[in-house]
Amino acid sequence: MGGECIVRKEEVAMEKKEIAKSCPYVRKCGACQIGEKSYEEELADKKKWVAECIGRHCGKIHDVAGMYYPYHYRNKVHAVFGRRSDQGREEVIAGTYAAGTHTIIPVKDCLIEDAQAAAIIQTVTGLIQSFGLWVYNEDTGRGLMRHVLVRKGTSTRQIMVVLVTASPEFPHKNHFVERLMERHPEITTIVQNINGKETTMVLGERNKTLYGKGYVEDVLLGLHFRISPGSFYQVNSEQTQVLYKKVIQAAGLTGTETVIDAYCGIGTIGMCMHAKAGRVVGIELNGQAVKDAKANAMRNHLEHMHFAAADATEYMTRMSQKGERADVVVMDPPRSGSTEAFVRAAASLHPRCVIYVSCNPETLGRDLGWFAKEGYAADEAWPVDMFGFTQNLEVVVKMQPVRRRKALTDG
Ligand code: SAH
């Protein structure tokens, strides 16, 4: 896939300028930082940023692997509901918060979001209006409809709609679902998620399946994954495969290794490494994600794949206290990065390499410093752009114990 992911320079550069001009939300919504730069310039800026953040800890930093077509790539689309007065008429709107505020910018078709998902959100918004359902008001804490989340399995075309409500009572629920399905027969499942808390988190803890299976499936590198409403899943399926291939390549597996997949989510990275490893253990804190992960391992008939619903640091510390070791530790923490305690626990398993997958070069730089203190040095970094038009990207870093690296060089 890496080879297919070549940016057609003139075409994308020109297109981006043209398309960027056609976005009516430029500099209004907080979703992306769309601008006048070409995609090449964006990728070059991203590489510079990675170098600034991790350069002092890392050997070679490769060019950023860019997207072939950096539009409509987001397989997960979220909108918050609000109301606005238009010429004396109250109207339900759905959109995103303006950067740094809680003012909703109604977004109808966004350049980076999946177009089908965006159309479904428009229909849901219209149905809320025609059914006379109350939109949740953050200031008063009253009202019902809070958010809508649409997730699409890029390969399977399955679509999940999650309607987030402030309370379990959903008037005209069955009729609402019927009307939505009539308009969008492509939807494969509809879930009601209940979030009654005053919080900036979109999803609450309870899910009620209103239609279909309650999750969507996607295929990555030939493996099937089920994704529940609360489970983490990369938003750009195509580039995720580029990223995971880099991880597999960097790990240099021979078929016998014990691999730890820390912060594993629904188990995607570990499962993609399974065919080349002896045994893979995924560690994840979110119970719903672990449930998905176990179902995914069964579905793909992966016999040497195990999962632990646990804090990764505590689990690895217990492993090392029992005298267990790991050959390869893969870690993919949230944006806030890892912790010094995690780094110590990972090093205590004496892996021959650590593969760090990061979505935040700043916390990555800090964490590489902690690894250096434990005797692990970063050789190479491969940035992968998963989020065109935004300032985000993913970086894969390979670390090895300094002594091992020296021995390999001397040998
Ligand atoms: N590797 C996965 C998910 C990465 S997102 C993928 O590629 O899809 C980061 C994950 O770390 C989330 O699923 C989050 O629930 C989990 N997490 C956060 N803190 C954790 C901890 N202390 N121990 C284990 N998992 C944790």
Image (tube, helix red, strand yellow):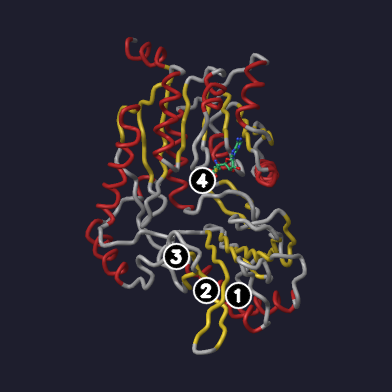
Residue 119 got which mark? 2
Q: Are marks 3 and 1 in contact (CB under 8 Å)?
A: no
Q: Are marks 3 and 2 in contact (CB under 8 Å)?
A: no
CA distance separating discs 3 and 1? 21 Å
Q: Secondary structure at mark 2?
A: helix
Q: Earlier in the sequence, mark 3 or mark 1?
A: 3
Q: Identify the residue under disc 3.
A: 98
Decide: few, some or many residues near mark 3? Use Cα within 10 Å; few <14, some 14-19, many ≥20: some
CA distance separating discs 4 and 1? 33 Å
Query: Which of the two marks, 1 or 2, is nearer to us in this view?
Result: 1
Q: Image point 57% across, 33% down: which residue? A: 262
Q: From the viewer's perspective, is 127 left or right of 22? A: right
- Image-quadrant location for residue 121: bottom right
Q: Identify the residue under disc 4.
A: 221
Query: Which of the two marks, 4 or 2, is nearer to us in this view?
Result: 2
Query: Which of the two marks, 4 or 3, is nearer to us in this view?
Result: 3
Query: Which of the two marks, 3 or 2, is nearer to us in this view?
Result: 3
Q: Earlier in the sequence, mark 1 or mark 2?
A: 2
Q: Image point 27% across, 69% down: which residue? A: 18
- Whether disc 4's CB lies below 8 Å from ligand 1 is answered no
Type of the residue with mark 4: Leu
Front-most of 224 and 27?
Answer: 27
Q: Secondary structure at mark 4?
A: loop
CA distance separating discs 4 and 3? 36 Å
